[in-house]
Amino acid sequence: MGAVISRVEEDGLGAEMGLEPGDELLAIDGEKPRDVVHYRYLMAGETVELHVRKKDADTIWVVEVEKDYDTSLGVEFSTPIFDGVKTCTNRCVFCFVDQMPPGLRSSLYLKDDDYRLSFLHGNFVTLSNLTDENLTLIKRMRLSPLYVSVHATDPVVRQRLMRGKKTGDILGQLQFLVDAGIEVHTQVVLCPGLNDGAVLQRTLDDLATLWPGVRSVGVVPVGLTRYRRGLYPVEPVTPRVAKKTLEMVRRRQAGFKEILGSRFVFLGDEFFLFLGEALPSWDAYEGFPQLENGIGLARRIMDEFQALEPNLPRRLAVARRATVVTGRAGEAVLRPLVRRLNQVQGLSVELRVVPNHFFGPTVTVTGLLTGQDVMDTLLLARSGGKKSLGRVLIPAVMLQDERVFLDNITVEELASRIGEPVEVVAATAASLVEAVLGGPGGLGDETTGGHRRPAQCGQIDPVQPLGSKAGFDHR
């Protein structure tokens, strides 16, 4: 693989040296870069010696470069990881990848468990495949923050959940990171009968002893698809389990707030939406440390829209029609917003809730909808006598590689089949408002935006839905 250059900035140091796309950076001061983070670390000095293999010859350049401190070469690489992505060595009983059907593109079956992607993109990792050398590099390069899937601190329970060889000493690994000055955000995938109840309470209390190094804990419900055959019999989160978990976490939050000055643990939006409970206030999320895990996303969208509402126009000079697409989990959040937008004269907005036939009805997360399910729902709407859907607004979280759904259907294919313009909107209230009103940003310029990282280790691409990270059972 190697550190192969894919782009050279015109006015950068690399261009001045004569670097070209296809060249490979072999070493910096005699040390082979492992990834883009390591590259930046090695390039920090004012004088560096580079070894470069040219793309069109066996020639290897050895160049001594004098530069300003912390100035890079002004190049991009074909991949952020040069020595291969570290993959998961566990066989977690709840792994979403194991619950996917065959036939999807190969990248969706990759179980990444790489601490560098945790630092770069916020991916949750288990730490179970780390070597002493990896830990030394994390400390040396100050890779902070990191995002760690804990699931349980009881070593026996964690091993039972993850079924890996090196899963037991999670508290020791976290202590090492905290002592090294690394900030850590953790998560628990809640599996009824396995790591809920007293096990969860112990996990929270154990992690709290590492505050403030361990900065937060996110608790999210396990997700189960219709393809879960021949796997460990994991039970879904029921209303009873959800209610008991919500009550216990609220008690622990109160205690942590008094002792630590922070609520410390935060529940996934799914618990509140599933139970019809009011979402916590904006302040209760304490800066939204687990937002990329979908925790607090519903509150953020609702409050952002409330702040925008006074500036909505009373009427539009030119009538506009739009259709907003969401999964079932996003409906409760988006329905009031759409209702308010329809009070603008000349504006007609319809919310289309797409059932997930591909993964099954219990998977309600917007980010796990396929292009085919979206297409079928929209075609059904057209067949019902509706003359036009208007501009169809697709949340960016549905898309992989910017404009491709999970099942390889492209945005352009969808638009062609339904005969309507399709635009991509970021998962923010501002982007939604700008899109339906035809303003700049959001959907107006067909940018994706809002695309980031996976909620858990060993699961598919970074997806947060418009309105809520997930419905009950996507994890």
Image (spheres, helix red, strand yellow):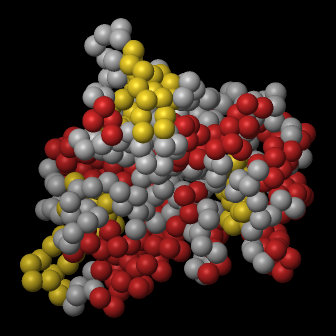
Question: Residue 433 at what x, y percent from top left?
Answer: 30, 74
Q: Is residue 131 above or below residue 154?
A: above
Nearest the camera: 356 or 124?
A: 124
Spot the residue most to the top: 58
Question: Residue 437 at what x, y percent from top left?
Answer: 21, 75
Q: Image quarter for residue 412?
A: top left
Question: Residue 429 at what x, y percent from top left?
Answer: 38, 72
Label total for image: 0
Determine whether, in the image, residue 96 is placed left or right of residue 214. left
Determine whether, in the image, residue 105 is placed left or right of residue 194. left
The residue at 70%/34% (across/down) is 134
Nearest the camera: 139 or 299?
A: 139
Q: Is residue 101 above or below residue 246?
A: above
The residue at 64%/44% (across/down) is 141
Question: Residue 324 at what x, y percent from top left?
Answer: 31, 64
Q: Is residue 41 above or below residue 319?
A: above
Q: Is residue 349 above or below residue 161?
A: below
Spot the residue most to the left: 318
Q: Image quarter for residue 265?
A: bottom right
Work out whether residue 369 can be spotted.
no
Determine whether, in the image, residue 262 is placed left or right of residue 306. right
Work out whether residue 72 can be spotted.
yes
The residue at 75%/68% (across/down) is 264
The residue at 48%/49% (across/down) is 69
